[in-house]
Amino acid sequence: MIGALRRWASRHTEQSRYSPVGIAFHWIMAVLILAQLSIGWYASLLPSGGDKLLTYELHSAVGLPILLLAIGRLFWRVIIPGPINDADSAGWQTQAAYLTHYLFYFCFFGLPLSGWIMWSALGEPAPLRLAGFIPWPSLPMYEVSPETQYRLLAVAEESHHILVLLLVLLIPLHIAAALKHHFWDRHDVLRGMLPEVPDWEDPRKGKQHRPREPRLHEQ
Ligand code: HEM
Ligand code: HEM
């Protein structure tokens, strides 16, 4: 099974492209993470009350799928190596890119896990629901003493803040690097992370694209 997946993915990775599964993981998670940062910030600015709680419920509903996607993405990344592209010969920049990717994965797990711990230690302010409708259990905080619960809450809250900061620093760096490779170095890195647009042959009879005849005045 894994061998078959690797053979399928190698058709893409051998052409310096991420596989369609890798690309789908990247862009779905990029959108969810950016949404999640905005919802979290918006919630933190609201005064205490019903609206704040509702916004945090939305925040947890979007955050929990990120944890599941992170597990799937890590599994995929372990069995399917990334492509070798032009950026792999860029010396320290390559190392910096790898470090950024590792730190991103750390945030993909650390943020939802610390959020889940916070939610559970707060005495489950509202039931957790994956994507807003699938019931999700709280962690069994009732099994630990109130002091341990309080300490766990403090550590989880601190970790959540630090990881949010880390993301906010890394995302612009990552985007700037991707655009620099594309527009400045003219590397194939960004193209390898974008969906492939196939070159169709026009199926209508006799309509195959032919190079345009030069106009008389161009001859
Ligand atoms: C990738 C996923 C996540 C991101 C990017 C994220 C981001 C944020 C941001 C930007 C804030 C407001 C600023 C801050 O307190 O640092 C926040 C706060 C919070 N988040 Fe998340 N979060 C994620 C996942 C989750 C999940 C899954 C839960 C709950 C199950 C959660 C629960 C909370 C709570 C309770 C707070 C309030 C913390 C406080 O008041 O100190 N988060 N999050
Ligand atoms: C929240 C936003 C984003 C996150 C968290 C993120 C995360 C990642 C991660 C973890 C990888 C490593 C590949 C993998 O394991 O799947 C990656 C690769 C990549 N990302 Fe992003 N990304 C984000 C947004 C963007 C944007 C907006 C762009 C384009 C401007 C971009 C361009 C790329 C490119 C070109 C690669 C391939 C790098 C290489 O192979 O060296 N990313 N991204």
Image (cartoon, rainbow, N blue to C red):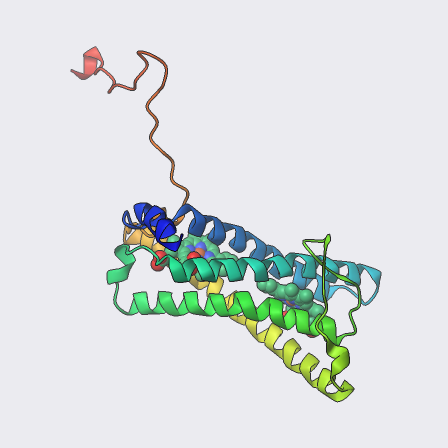
Where is residue 114, by image quadrant? bottom right
Name the residue: 31% across, 65% down: 94
Where is residue 59, by image quadrant? bottom right
Relative to the observer, which residue lies in front, 128 or 101? 128
Above or below, 125 against 13 in this view is below
Whether residue 175 is visible here, answered yes or no, is no
Would you say 179 lies left or right of 49 here? left
Q: Quadrant of the C terminus?
A: top left
Where is residue 140, by image quadrant? bottom right
Above or below, 6 against 141 in this view is above
Name the residue: 61% across, 74% down: 161
Residue 93: image location, x then y, percent:
31, 66
**Within the displayed image, which quadrant is ligand 1 positioned in?**
bottom right
Would you say 159 lies left or right of 1 here? right
Residue 72: image location, x then y, percent:
50, 58
Name the residue: 20% across, 11% down: 216
Whether residue 20 is visible here, answered yes or no, is yes
Relative to the observer, which residue lies in front, 23 or 184? 23
